[in-house]
Amino acid sequence: MIDDAPWSDYSRARLPRGLTYAVGRDVIEHALRQAGATIGSLSLGPPPPRPRNTDDGSMVFDVYWVGDARPSRLDSAWGASAPERLLMRWHAVPTPVRAAIRDELVEHWLPLASAWAAAAPHRRNTWAATDHRWMVVLTARTLRLAED
């Protein structure tokens, strides 16, 4: 793990002017530690290209469980232990949007996501066998949960 952080791998992209991350690495680390969660990878990156004519919103962050029913790149890359199957990804947001959503993310959504991540490795075999995604989406400055 990097600097005894609750993740094994960390990456952070440089952003163009006008974009920022809704929360920083230290805030994420604190929430994961509070929940007792350990994840394989934390990545902070630019927003993905948005499809035209969609009102589905854009992902702010997600926690992704990579199921263990089939071989994956994680099996050889990380040894496929349960925490290593958890990935947390954050997408940058426009700077003015950050001010509108940061507090809600820190106080509500990040603790929920961290609790989900802490519980994931302890779920039963049927759940652990398939991929699962816990995602916070921003639509017109409103945050909502999308889970699959």
Image (tube, rainbow, N blue to C red):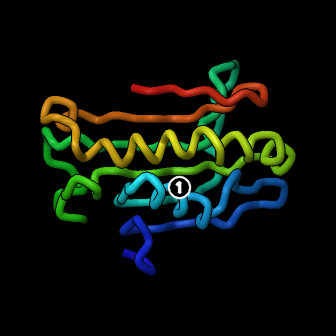
Q: Name the residue that disc number 1 marks.
A: 31
Question: Which residue does the image show at 39% across and 51% down from the upper left?
Answer: 87
The image quarter in which residue 123 lies: top left
Q: Amino acid at mark 1?
A: Ala
Q: Residue at x 74, y 45 (%)?
A: 103
* Residue 2, quarter of picture: bottom left
Q: Is residue 127 left or right of residue 93?
A: left
Name the residue rendered at 67%, 30% in the picture: 143
Of helix, strand and loop, which one carries label 1?
A: helix
Camera-side residue: 126 or 55? 126
Which residue occupies the foreground of this view, 56 or 141?
141
Would residue 128 be found to the left or right of residue 57 on screen?
left
Q: Nearer the viewer, residue 115 or 51?
A: 115
Question: Which x, y percent locates residue 56?
Answer: 63, 21
Relative to residue 5, is residue 109 depicted above or below? above
Q: Residue at x 51, y 26 (%)?
A: 146
Name the outermost residue toward the front: 34
- For disc 1, the neighbor class at 10 Å (few under 14, some 14 to 19, many from 20) is some
Residue 100 sits above or below residue 14 on the image: above
Does residue 48 appear left or right of residue 119 in this picture?
right
Quadrant of the snapshot with the C terminus: top left
Decide: is 84 above or below 135.
Answer: below
Task: Looking at the picture, tell me which residue is in the foreground, 96 or 52.
Answer: 96
Q: Position of residue 104 (x, y in %)?
A: 70, 40
- Quarter the N terminus occupies: bottom left
Q: Which residue ends up furthest to the bottom in the rendered image?
A: 3
Residue 122 percent coordinates (x, y): 22, 43
Q: How many marks?
A: 1
